[in-house]
Amino acid sequence: MNHIKAMRVLELQVNGTKRRVEIDGERSLLSVLRGELDLTGAKYGCGEGQCGACTVLIDGRAARSCLTQAASVEGKQITTVEGLERNGDLHPLQEAFLAVDAMQCGYCTAGMLMSGVGLLKKTPNPTDAEILRAMEGNVCRCGTYPRIVAAIRRAASGDKAAKGGAQ
Amino acid sequence: MIEQLMDEIEIEPERYELTAGPAYHFELGEMRRRDFFRVLGGGLLIVLALKDAPAQQESGGGGRRGGSPRPVEIGAWLHIAEDGTVTAYTGKAEVGQNIRTSLTQSVAEELRAPVSTIKVVMGDTELTPYDMGTFGSRTTPDMFPQLRKAAAAARETMLDLAAEGLKVERDSLLAADGKVTHPATRRSLSYGELSKGQKIMKAISAASLSPSGEWKVAGKPLRKINGRDIVTGRHHYTPDVKLPGMLHGKVLRPSAFGATLASIDSKEAEKLPGVVVARDGDFVGVVAPNEETVARAVTAIRAEWKATPQVSAKELFEHLRKTPNLPANAPTNPSTGLPTNPPTGLAESLAAAHQKLERTYTIAYIAHAPLEPRAAVAEWKDGKLTVWTGTQRPFGVREELAGAFRIPETSVRVIVPDTGSGYGGKHSGEAAIEAARLAKAAGKAVKLVWTREEEFTWAYFRPAGVIDVTSGVNKDGVITAWDFHNYNSGNAGLRPVYAIQNQRCEFHRSDSPLRQGSYRALASTANHFAREVHIDELAASLKMDPLEFRLKNLKDDRLRAALEAAAKAFGWGKSKPAADHGFGIAGGFEKGGYIANCAEVSVDRASGKVKIVRVVTAFECGAIVNPDGLKNQVEGSVIQGIGGALFEAIDFADGKILNPRFSRYRVPRFSDTPELETVLLDRKDLPSAGAGECPIVALAPAVGAAIFDATGVRLRSLPMVPGGLHS
């Protein structure tokens, strides 16, 4: 059997910047972000799209980067947690996470933020049911769920920038 | 008196991982093989600290023969740089319990320096004083006062230096805000100017500590000190650490627990670009330039393993009960003076009881499933080994590494980046040893990150258990006899808080088919489940209110206060909102904390689905250090506790884990979260106890009681409803 996969050059749009990577065609977006682009904010948690720690935005929608082939998102806008901050200003949801201390160990936080930002882009004033539906795929083993819900509510009701923020 | 000088803690017997043999016996190629022994023996007593004896060497939570003594000089714990930056050093690890923040508060409080000037270096064996490990809820009762003492002594030193420098009476000076001021002349010197960045070699004196009632920084909410690094993705957990030229490693796992390697063919794997296969006995590992290649290479290895038949989940409880292979209650907890023989009168009082109740409760194995799996980055340089790894025991892992590679501990440095949680599950150094072995084979730095499946399979589990309870009550609702036997799950929380005249509580070690060890609150969750459900059963059989029944049998005022506070906030005694709802209450104590939970559940009779609607928690752990951080811990414990209470269970057969994935092992999610109310009882007159563990112990029995209240169905196994009530 032949394990050596063909190498190819990918051009990815990450956090508003064009990034070229030479990889074999079958690598996951998570692996490329972390291994090639040094964007380690998105985390490995399960590798099967069950925990949400690897969540990024693809064209503004929350997606599991561990199940996304890097080659499939060429030409799309990819946003990672590192891309939420603008000129030193945190995204309102990041501010809200800090304000209500919506974290303990913090390993799930990046994925929570990206799922939350994805929700707020689509639904600027989500109901509690909408928050639960959007966040159900993200696991926090420390159990900070009520605080994360409070942070999303806070960002939604706060200033308008909560809805614009990241790409 | 030596007894008055020492705080002793017992290492509970169910911390099996601390006394287990080493994971690997490496041949190490050129090195001569010799067996090494682990110095941690079973059930040993650990001398933690000498109280009020500043001039003596503290034994620093040594916990092993030859363990380094706790240093007495201020400079080992605290440094003030010329620019005023304060660095505190502790061997504790941050795993989400927020001690980086609370320890910063301890230093700020006593040193009288702004929080923003303080940095805490944690869990680095080269930089921080020896520490036994971050477990047993010891950071708050042990490290919090230790850093307070060091900071207070540093503050006193600053006052001495300022008195000399300003040539004024020491009593006329004021230490505040990172400087010493002479109010009469309005002159001041900053701590940086006073210390000139030099190490303070003075011994930590018996400097006066601020009484908790006068705390200005401690005792107040403070947000996570490095929260910004977390929300921006800037913090580097172990899997995010990258070294120049680093390779990626992976271990070939055996087909079953205890399997030995019969044959191996790694030719295909070795054809992959940059792949090196390393074999050392039954250990087979691979390194490659990136994680995809290394994963592919491991899959390409053809190995045959020799495995032996093993006990499976379906025969587990029978197996545990029939294999107590060690003397009951070994080791006995000396501080409780637990009787090992049935007290005279137990049989008589059972026979004479108005009502006798005999019940069995079972507890499944569960996994910690920390979201950050075990990971390590290892690098050898000039015979010295440096390993970054997520562990609760940096010095314990250093010892494991030194043992595995037969090098002195001084040649090993373990650095623990703030870690993606542990819950008692990261006391061991498997990934560190594997990464170091592969780095040695490759001659390059190696990163090794366990997959979720590896974490679910090759870490250790919370012990399963069978608990038999026989009790007797008299006509007035007084418990007169209590015979409690725990098989396998452990000793923690074994004894009731209820005042029962004739009682026997025993822990029996069994032969565990799975690797098991510490878990948040240890066996206290299992023992509280059995005890508090049993109490609820007794109350029901006497047709007494379960709260009233508890209060009648309770002598402990702290637990009484917690139960009453929870009941009041919950509205205990009010009628249920709907017929398919139920209320339950339970309480207990562990690791110096007192907990009471009231739960409301709803049960869908058609589907059998159980939903926890509302949980009120009252918690008391002495003087509160960081109210919001504490609340976060209590809420998190309750939510994590939902998993073990309702649906978490490891399924296994013949040495294999059958559900090693989040898609097959259900953990609590957003929609499982009930409405939470937390009442914190602040006892400023009492020393602060830790809070990471206790608040998990009473949730399951409260929920079980609520399910009984809603349906009349009594559930005696954890998890209670893995497939709904009908399962």
Image (cartoon, coloured by chain):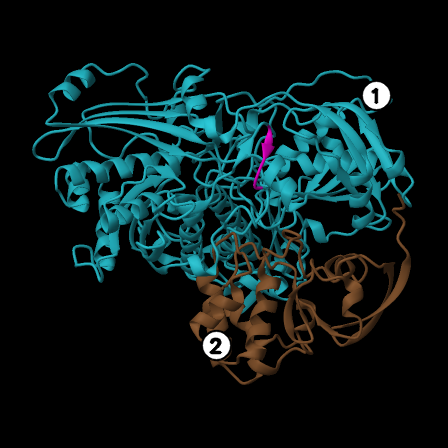
Separation of marks 2 and 1 at Cα, in angstroms:
63 Å
Q: Are marks 2 and 1 on the same chain?
A: no
Residue lying at the far front of the rendered structure: B606
Left or right: B317 with respect to B513?
left
Whether residue B689 is visible, yes or no, is no
Q: Main secondary structure of the magenta part?
A: loop
- Please provide percent x and percent y for residue A93: 55, 73
Q: In the image, what residue type sits under mark 1?
A: Met
Q: Quadrant of residue B217?
A: bottom left
Residue hosting label 2? A126
Residue lying at the far bottom of the rendered structure: A160
- Say which element carries label 2: loop
Q: Quadrant of the N terminus of chain A?
A: top right
- Say which element carries label 1: loop
Chain B image colour: cyan
Which region shows up in magenta?
B655-659
- Please provide percent x and percent y for residue B106: 48, 52
Front one among B8 and B55: B8
Q: Quadrant of residue B379?
A: top right
Residue hosting label 1? B31
Subunit under mark 2? A
Whether the magenta-drawn stretch holds residue B657 is answered as yes
Residue B541 sits above or below residue B582 on the image: above
Q: Quadrant of the C terminus of chain A?
A: bottom right
